[in-house]
């Protein structure tokens, strides 16, 4: 009787593992797909509904929506190298997927973080392939004096995903019991 009970338990473990693994994969895939859709739709809205010279203040003196075409990489550096950026983006996406496959999928935040980074990389790759530049539209500034380079949802997803990875890489603080 004892052996049949242990056999049943052994059979149930793989099912439980598969369910948790499926949840992790679903988190990663839904995050990546949702992020790409959000990025592409937001760019489409701004670039079809807003004139090139227009700006919409979201928070006056701080955040505006504008049209900006970035032919370079971060902060517009190295413009005109679209084919190289496409190749680099494809390599980055392959590395992200490889890291995800090899990663421990149990922490929710790691699935979420890698999904966000993948979404951002794919959203900007989409632009490079279809437009030969990245469509940016979020203008963060302080008054009219200090401007951060214009960015988009994909850039934000990458930054948020990397921030999750960095913050989650620190060990949890251990509290000492009171004496």
Image (cartoon, helix red, strand yellow):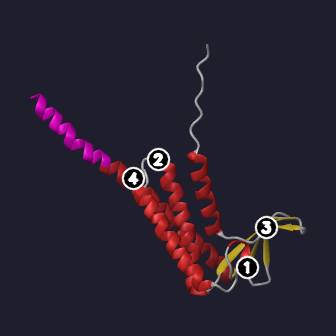
Looking at the image, which residue is at 62% across and 54% down?
163
Mark earlier in primary sequence (4, 3): 4
Q: Residue 23, labelled with which disc?
A: 4
Front tag of 1 and 2: 2
Q: Secondary structure at mark 2?
A: loop
Q: Tell me if mark 2 has few (under 14), some (14-19) or many (20+) residues whose alpha carbon lies within 10 angstroms of its own.
A: few
Distance CA(mark 4)–CA(mark 3): 37 Å
Q: Quadrant of the N terminus?
A: top left
* Gap in angstroms between the C-alphas marked 3 and 1: 14 Å
Q: Which mark is residue 150?
A: none
**Which mark is nearer the camera, 4 or 2?**
2
Give the label on residue 107, or none.
Answer: 2
Left/right of residue 97 with respect to residue 158 in the rendered view: left
Residue 37 appears in the picture as rendered: no
Please give left or right for residue 99 compared with residue 44 in the image.
left
State the image coordinates of residue 130 (x, y, percent, origin top left): 56, 86
Question: Which residue is depicted at the point 53% across and 79% down?
Answer: 87
**3D distance between C-alphas at marks 1 and 4:** 38 Å
Q: Is residue 12 covered in magenta?
A: yes
- Whole-angstrom CA distance, mark 1 to mark 2, is 38 Å
* SS state under label 3: loop
Pointer 2 or 3: first along the chain: 2
Which dot marks residue 148? 3
Residue 144 vertical position relative to residue 107 in the rendered view, above or below? below
Say which residue label 1 marks.
67
How far apart, in angstroms, are the residues tagged by discs 4 and 2?
Answer: 11 Å
Give the extent of the magenta segment: 1-17
């Amino acid at each position: 009787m004892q052996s049949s009970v242990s056999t049943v338990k052994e059979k149930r473990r793989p099912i439980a593992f598969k369910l948790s693994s499926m949840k992790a994969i679903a988190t990663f895939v839904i995050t990546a797909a949702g992020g790409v859709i959000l990025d592409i739709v937001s760019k489409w809205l701004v670039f079809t509904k807003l004139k090139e010279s227009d700006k919409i203040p979201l928070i006056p003196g701080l955040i505006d929506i504008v049209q900006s075409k970035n032919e370079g990489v971060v902060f517009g550096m190295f413009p005109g190298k679209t084919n190289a950026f496409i190749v680099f983006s494809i390599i980055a996406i392959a590395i992200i997927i490889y890291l995800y496959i090899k990663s421990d999928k149990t922490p929710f935040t790691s699935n979420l973080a890698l999904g966000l980074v993948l979404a951002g990389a794919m959203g900007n790759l989409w632009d490079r392939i279809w437009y030969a530049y990245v469509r940016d539209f979020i203008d963060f500034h302080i008054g009219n004096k200090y401007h951060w380079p214009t960015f988009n949802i994909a850039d934000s997803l990458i930054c948020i995903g990397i921030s999750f990875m960095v913050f989650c890489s620190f060990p949890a603080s251990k509290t000492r019991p009171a004496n």
